[in-house]
Image (cartoon, rainbow, N blue to C red):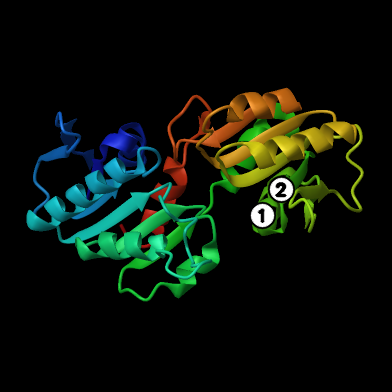
């Protein structure tokens, strides 16, 4: 087996290769003056099982094209089996149509990946796991969760017994996994939309967070608005230490400032999207899964 670390996940790809004790190939890449991507593999993949590691966070379209170039090239040069690890899968939030005529972008992206010869796709904490159940292709998709290893990292930081809280009911799966590690209980904010103003009210019911450490878990922090509102509400309820935790730390615009100004002690994320918040690596869970399925 050989690992091909894509330009967007070079460090993560090398970490996975070390975890597995296999070779990581070099990928030469650049952008032409007109913005087109150039990719060249350095090393043979003929007859090999290949793992391609490439996240698709901003700039999404460039990184998606690089991913497709890598997978198609590995196929052209005789790879026996191709598995892609795409820790953050772009367009995964566009998983269904809300208005007539909208593109179902997640389905399009999955079809593109499969069309280049990919056999298995590994993603981490996809936004809506139910969306994968609608996939009708041959390519097998595995959704792994980084929440337990984030919780374990926080436990080692002295936050054992902290309350695990989701920003909405959709995050209940994440906070249950976190509580299996932290043992401080779990719950989620309830949201109610004002039918006149359209504003969203967030409330915590049947939970006393006064004087307690609380960790707000979500799959993605993007603009930071929802997380900031959750942190601010916890602060008003007397929570002691508040941590904002996520798998994919996109943190666009003023997200960091919004969340810290609301009262979060710190923000923690994984290297699914490399940034200064990437305190936890997903390499061990990817390597563990690959060994489990026979790599």
Dot 1: few (<14), some (14–19), or many (≥20) neighbours within 10 Å? many
Residue 236 x %, y %: 88, 33
Residue 21: in sight, yes or no? no
- Numbered circles on residues, count: 2
Residue in front for this viewpoint, 281 or 109: 109
Could you tell me residue 266's position as x and y percent? 66, 26
Q: Where residue 16 sits in the image (x, y, percent)? A: 35, 41
Q: Residue at x 30, y 42 (%)?
A: 63
The residue beneath circle 2 is: 167
Q: Is residue 268 above or below residue 92?
A: above
Find out whether the residues at labels 1 and 2 contact each other: C-beta distance under 8 Å.
yes
Quadrant location, the C terminus: bottom left
Residue on which the image places disc 1: 171
- SS type, badge 1: helix
Inspect this view and state whether residue 151 appears.
Answer: yes
Distance of label 1 from label 2 (alpha carbons): 7 Å
Height in image: 202 above or below 237? below
């Amino acid at each position: 087996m050989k690992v091909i670390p894509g330009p967007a996940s070079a460090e993560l790809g090398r970490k996975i290769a070390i975890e597995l004790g296999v070779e990581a190939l070099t990928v030469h890449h650049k952008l032409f003056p007109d913005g087109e991507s150039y990719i060249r593999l350095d090393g043979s993949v003929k007859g090999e099982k290949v793992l391609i590691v490439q996240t698709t966070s901003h700039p999404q379209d460039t990184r998606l094209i690089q991913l497709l170039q890598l997978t198609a090239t590995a196929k052209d040069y005789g790879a026996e089996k191709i598995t892609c690890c795409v820790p953050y899968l772009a367009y995964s939030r566009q998983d269904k149509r809300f208005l007539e005529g909208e593109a179902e972008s997640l389905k399009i992206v999955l079809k593109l990946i499969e069309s280049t010869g990919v056999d298995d796709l590994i993603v981490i904490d996809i936004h809506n796991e139910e969306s994968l159940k609608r996939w009708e292709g041959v390519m097998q998709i595995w959704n792994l969760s980084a929440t337990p290893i984030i919780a374990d990292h926080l436990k080692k930081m002295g936050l054992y017994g902290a309350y695990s809280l989701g920003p909405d009911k959709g995050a209940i799966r994440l906070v249950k996994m976190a509580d299996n590690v932290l043992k401080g209980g779990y719950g989620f904010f309830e949201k109610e939309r004002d039918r006149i103003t359209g504003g969203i009210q967030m409330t915590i019911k049947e939970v006393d967070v006064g004087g307690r450490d609380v960790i707000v878990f979500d799959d993605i922090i993007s603009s930071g608005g929802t997380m900031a509102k959750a942190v601010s509400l916890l602060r008003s309820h007397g929570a002691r230490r508040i941590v904002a935790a996520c798998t994919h730390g996109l943190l666009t615009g003023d997200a960091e400032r919004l969340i810290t100004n609301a009262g979060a002690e710190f923000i923690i994320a994984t290297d699914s999207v490399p940034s200064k918040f990437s305190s936890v690596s997903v390499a061990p869970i990817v390597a563990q899964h690959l060994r489990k399925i026979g790599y």
